[in-house]
Image: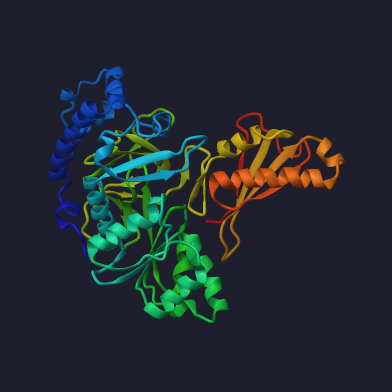
Amino acid sequence: MIWNERMECISPSELKNIQSERLRETVAYVYQNSPYYRKKLQAADINPERVRDIGDLKHLPFTIKEDMRDSYPFGLFSAPLKSIVEIHVSSGTTGNPTVVGYTREDIKLWSEVMARALCCAGAKPQDMIQIAYGYGLFTGGLGFHYGALEMGLIILPASSGQTKRQLKLMADFKPRILACTPSYCLYMAEEAREMGIDPKKSSWEVGSFGAEPWSESMRREIEATWNMAALDVYGLSEITGPGVAHECQHKDGLHIFWDVFYPEVINPKTGKPAEDGKEGELVITTLTKKGIPLLRYRTRDIVNIDYKKCKCGRTSPRISKITGRTDDMIIVRGINVFPSQIEHVLLGIEGTKPHYQLIVDRKAGELDELDVLVEVEQKFFSDEIKGLRAIEEKIKKEIESILGIFVKVKLVEPKTLERSEGKAKRVVDKRVI
Ligand SMILES: [Zn+2]
């Protein structure tokens, strides 16, 4: 089933007219309503009336994460606060988080693209869906909720965590669709076996998994463990949350809904378009959003993009699974973690050095773990062990309060951590994904 056949199967040449018209409207709209964008466009010497078609996009300036942070909380909004109906917040690098606001129209758009995404996954009206993404300021839970509501699914808004209860809901209510992070899905298998539930006999036939990078081997493991189809969903709160792109049953890249989220792939070093077929940084322009429309937003996700028509009949291009990031960000249990956040905490604690390392690991069937290694002054090691414990506890508490996930902190003696001549190696990602 294709949710919006008109838009998802349209010929690219016909769509180009629609995209061009939407781009003209968006540029005029932000120029008129956002002092921030007006200044930015003026500085780049862009006259909105000269933006004619989607090909003119390449002349427009980029928007980056720092633009959002610098204009905290509402400076990048183009719509007045009184027309915003929902606000979501995600963690940023240091200090201020990223804030996004949705008008009623934006929520409709989100519902529409998430309905398309769920159809890509193979959902049919009246299927039951268990949504085990977190509900709250994080966009995962509510994004799926809106799409499922739009499609007419039966929603189990389980939210994240409480694994035993998740499994009981699955066993008793028999939902056909599961939405959560891929690592949580595997984690649930261990718990299921302990409860005497055979994962292979689960009611889940289809899973929509995202919010963290995962690989083909993880897909094979999930599919074999649960006897279900595992499909990839992509999104980021700056653009809308989940629902930017989704794999169809052919599992050959994620269809990006480009009538509303226009993709470009650029060379992150030069800002110029990546060579044909080469991977690069995904840049997205929202073509219909009103609350916080973004021009050429640099996602920092590395992908390549395939414009060939898919066997499913959809004509939208497909982005590859995310192969990396242009910054140091890591995603741990669906949470964005930036080394600079940790650094910020350490700078405020006496006796620590600015030498630290984050080690993220995932043992089979378990959730991601984040270890923080921190060098402290030698004197702490000659003091009583109590002093070490106290400082360890302090660092742990502060990091946890910022990230919202448990971490392990290990204090090490000065000069233990490997030094680098160039960029410090802050992150060691041992996950096999
Ligand atoms: Zn397809």
* Residue in the picture at 45% in, 59% down: 181
Q: What percent of the width, then of the height, locates residue 386?
A: 81, 47
- Compared to residue 221, the image places residue 432 above or below, namely above
Number of labelled discs? 0
Q: What percent of the width, then of the height, locates residue 326?
A: 47, 37
* Residue in the picture at 41% in, 49% down: 137
* Residue in the picture at 23% in, 26% down: 31
Q: What percent of the width, then of the height, locates residue 207?
A: 38, 66
- Which scheme is used to colour this image of the protein? rainbow
Report if residue 416 is visible in the image.
yes
- Compared to residue 277, the image places residue 333 above or below, namely below
* Residue in the picture at 48% in, 72% down: 165
The image quadrant that residue 132 belongs to is bottom left
Q: In which quarter of the image is the N terminus?
A: bottom left
231 lies left or right of 150: right
Front residue of this view, candidates 92 and 2:
92
Report if residue 217 is visible in the image.
no
Q: What percent of the width, then of the height, locates residue 5?
A: 16, 57
131 lies left or right of 388: left
